[in-house]
């Protein structure tokens, strides 16, 4: 098989996989509908609390599975960005940091500037950064002496560099993995950031993101 044929076969496989996943999601939504009817009937009747709890867990699991499948479908499709100027990287990070400071997560944020702006797809990049926060909290070190997750934002003339430190040592790359909901979203976060011309990696037990603040000058 030639390289061209091999590439075409992989593209066909990718398209087929996306369609299969989309069909599976539709089936899950059908199961969720039946489970919702069952929950309502149980709530109307005098049923034991453990039966209600079981149905709620079933619904939660169906929601999570459908959400994961949607993320995989989005990962497999070609990404179109709607970039707009004025995306406040520092402000978004502060807001996300506040939302993750629930006492258990112990997230601390530091920035070397009050305002760091760039031209990005506001919705997609915010999602990507939120998933990075969630992933960092999941993978934070568990020993008390290590503390929580620290997030730092630094900038030079062309890039914003964001680091999530305080993570435990991982034996795999969570940005190229689909082992669970968090890592599916981390893989999509990597794709979003790379489509913005940036990069994301795991280095020295840190998540490191580089975002270009200026378009490259072509000579």
Image (cartoon, rainbow, N blue to C red):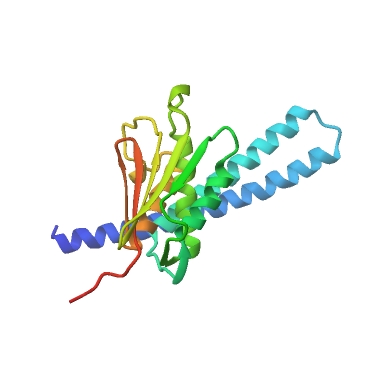
Can residue 111 be seen here?
A: yes
Residue 53 as seen in the image, left or right of residue 163: right
Q: How many marks?
A: 0
* Depicted 26 relative to depicted 79: above or below: above
Residue located farthest toward the bottom when viewing the structure as drawn: 219
Residue 77 placement (x, y as % from top left): 39, 62
Residue 202 as seen in the image, left or right of residue 94: left
* Depicted 155 relative to depicted 216: above or below: above
* Residue lying at 45% horizontally and 46% vertically, measured from the top left: 110
Residue 199 placement (x, y as % from top left): 31, 54
Which one is in front, 96 or 123? 96
Residue 64 as seen in the image, left or right of residue 178: right
Which one is in front, 38 or 53? 53
* Depicted 139 relative to depicted 17: above or below: above
Q: In which quarter of the image is residue 160?
A: bottom left
Quarter of the rendering occupied by the N terminus: bottom left
* Residue lying at 38% horizontally and 30% vertically, measured from the top left: 168
* Residue lying at 20% horizontally and 58% vertically, measured from the top left: 6
Which one is in front, 214 or 10? 214
* Residue lying at 78% horizontally and 29% vertically, measured from the top left: 49
Q: In which quarter of the image is residue 41?
A: top right
Quarter of the rendering occupied by the C terminus: bottom left
Residue 119 placement (x, y as % from top left): 41, 68
Can residue 22 be seen here?
A: no
Residue 124 placement (x, y as % from top left): 47, 60
* Depicted 155 relative to depicted 36: above or below: below
Residue located farthest toward the left when viewing the structure as drawn: 2
């Amino acid at each position: 098989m030639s390289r061209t044929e091999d590439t075409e076969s992989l593209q066909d496989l990718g398209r087929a996989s996306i369609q299969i996943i989309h069909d599976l999601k539709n089936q899950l939504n059908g199961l969720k509908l039946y489970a919702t009817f069952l929950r309502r009937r149980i709530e109307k009747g005098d049923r034991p609390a453990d039966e209600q709890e079981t149905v709620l867990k079933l619904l939660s699991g169906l929601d999570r599975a459908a959400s994961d499948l949607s993320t995989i479908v989005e990962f497999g499709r070609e990404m179109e960005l709607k970039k707009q100027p004025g995306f406040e990287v520092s402000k978004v990070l502060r807001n996300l940091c506040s939302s993750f400071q629930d006492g258990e997560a112990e997230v601390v944020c530091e920035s070397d500037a009050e305002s760091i702006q760039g031209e990005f797809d506001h919705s997609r990049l915010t999602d990507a950064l939120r998933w990075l926060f969630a992933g960092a909290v999941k993978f934070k070190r568990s020993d008390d002496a290590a503390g929580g997750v620290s997030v730092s934002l630094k900038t030079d003339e062309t890039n914003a560099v964001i680091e999530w430190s305080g993570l435990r040592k991982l034996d795999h790359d969570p940005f190229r993995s689909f082992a669970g909901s968090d890592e599916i979203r981390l893989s999509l976060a990597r794709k979003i950031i790379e489509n913005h011309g940036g990069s994301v990696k795991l280095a020295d037990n840190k998540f490191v993101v580089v975002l270009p603040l200026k378009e490259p000058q072509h000579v």
